[in-house]
Image (cartoon, helix red, strand yellow):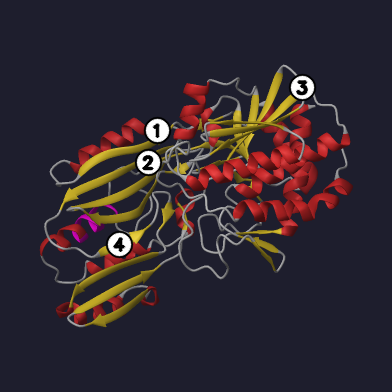
Amino acid sequence: MDFKKQIEAVMEPLAQDISALCQINSVEGEPQPGMPFGEGPAKALEAALALGERLGFRTENFDNYVGHIEMGEGEEMLGILGHVDVVPAGEGWDFDPWGGVIADGKIFGRGTLDDKGPLVTCLYAMKILKDMGVTLNKRVRIILGTNEETDWNCMAYYLNEVKPELPTIAFSPDSHFPVTYAEMGLLQYTLTREISEKLEIEGGNAFNSVPSKASVVLDGKYAADLEAAVAAYADPAMFAIEKADDKVILRATGVGAHAAYLWEGKNALTHMMAVLGQLPLEGELKEVVDFVNGHFGTCLYGENMGVACSDDDCGPLTLNLGKIVVEDGKLVLCCDSRIPVAFTVDSIEEAVKAKMEGTGYAYERVSTERPLYVPKDSELVQTLMEAYRTVTGDTESQPQSSGGATYSRTMDNCVAFGCLLPDQEDTMHQANECLELEHLKIWLEICLEAIYQLAK
């Protein structure tokens, strides 16, 4: 079906509504009465549901954990699963990350790609089908979560407390085009040790983000050794050295990336540790530096932790050291692994636990997610591939696997579908996250075709 005329008519309001939703800082915060994940996610959910009502759809809010936006009639249901929460903005932006600025043919803001932009795009696809009076045989329901970027308690509440009718077929627009048929298992954990000395070291802001910044304050006696170590490092431009009184400060600047694609980034924290490993350090700082270099290093695939593995569908396991925290007499390392579908989360967890024996670090599981696997020859995958190919003419791209963790894995017969195009710059979880308007138009056309084909 040709939707081009209708797409042109909604492009401006679509961009404005994405901008408006991205102006809400919906990073998870402290729980408040009626706001289980803080004020920001609750406001974003309310705004998204209000937009759904304004566009003429049925909506429902389940205690600010999850919301529904639904259209149509029928016994069967097509589900579209996404989230309105976002990761912290971080540093290095050229625009206000909460400004929703539209400039240079782009919408800038945290959430434009992950996942507010895709959700509003699907909502407008539903609007076009409704306004055209297209007959569908399935209901279409957008399911909006509110803490996808952390521990997915929103979906646990939805599935275990609300116990809703579940879609018979579904996709999540929270990944890449064309279709992600396999998602690696997810294991997030902390490694914690007691400290008695004053350590001034920091880096990263989330388990699932490659740290773009890190810093450490050292005794001034290390200044000369530090300058020599930085000069000899493979990429000395990553580092800046400052002297203050009897202290010397090392700052590292890397490249942020989503932990699912950590090879696209450069971990400022682990590279800083590599430099510190060249210094004649003493005491607990030396112990911490030696531990991080010995168990993580700057490798990406868990080699130093002893958990390296791979399969044909997903490739190698990944291990991201996403954050270091020093407070209340403890040092905490925040870790994120994506595990190939041929291996279990439990087996990797047991290997990490065994590796920690005798190190003085305590292992604690923070979050796990089961892997996703839907056969490439299934009706769902093949229908979505056809919708993508019909719009783009791309017959070369094939169904793919991913280290990304989307809500697709929470339900049966669900895969990730879009919205990032193969040639589109991926700025998810990075500074200057943005959505090009020319790509937004293609997103909308693909989502329209997919919803129509799956629900007709």
- Whichever of callouts 3 and 2 sits on the residue coming sooner in the sequence is 3
The residue tagged 2 is 309
Q: Quick check: marks 2 and 1 in contact, CB under 8 Å? A: yes
241 and 386: which is toward the camera = 241
Q: Which residue is mark 1?
A: 343
Amino acid type, callout 3: Glu
Which mark lies nearer to you, 4 or 1?
4
Q: What is the C-alpha distance between the residues marked 3 and 1?
A: 41 Å
Q: Is residue 447 visible?
A: no
User: Of discs 4 and 2, which sits in the foreground?
Assistant: 4
- Circle 1 packing at 10 Å, graded few (<14), some (14-19), many (20+), is some
- As measured in the structure, the alpha-carbon distance from the residue carrying label 4 to the one carrying label 1 is 33 Å
Three-letter residue code for mark 2: Cys
Give the number of the mark in front: 4 or 3.
3
Q: Amino acid at mark 4?
A: Glu
x and y percentages locating residue 36 in the rendered image: 45, 37
Residue contact between numbered discs 3 and 2, judged by CB atoms under 8 Å = no
Segment colored magenta: 289-296
183 in the magenta segment:
no
Q: Which one is earlier in the sequence, the residue at label 4 or at label 1? A: 4
Instruction: Label 1, secondary structure: give it.
Output: loop
How far, Cα to Cα, is label 3 from label 2? Answer: 46 Å
Residue type highlighted by circle 1? Phe
Q: Residue at x 72, y 65 (%)?
A: 105
Percent coordinates x, y for residue 432 in the rendering = 56, 64
Q: Secondary structure at mark 4?
A: strand
Query: On the picture, is 404 further left or further right than 299?
Result: right
Residue 215: assigned label? none
Which quadrant does the C terminus fall into?
A: top right
Residue at image mark 3: 73
Would residue 292 be counted in the magenta stretch? Answer: yes
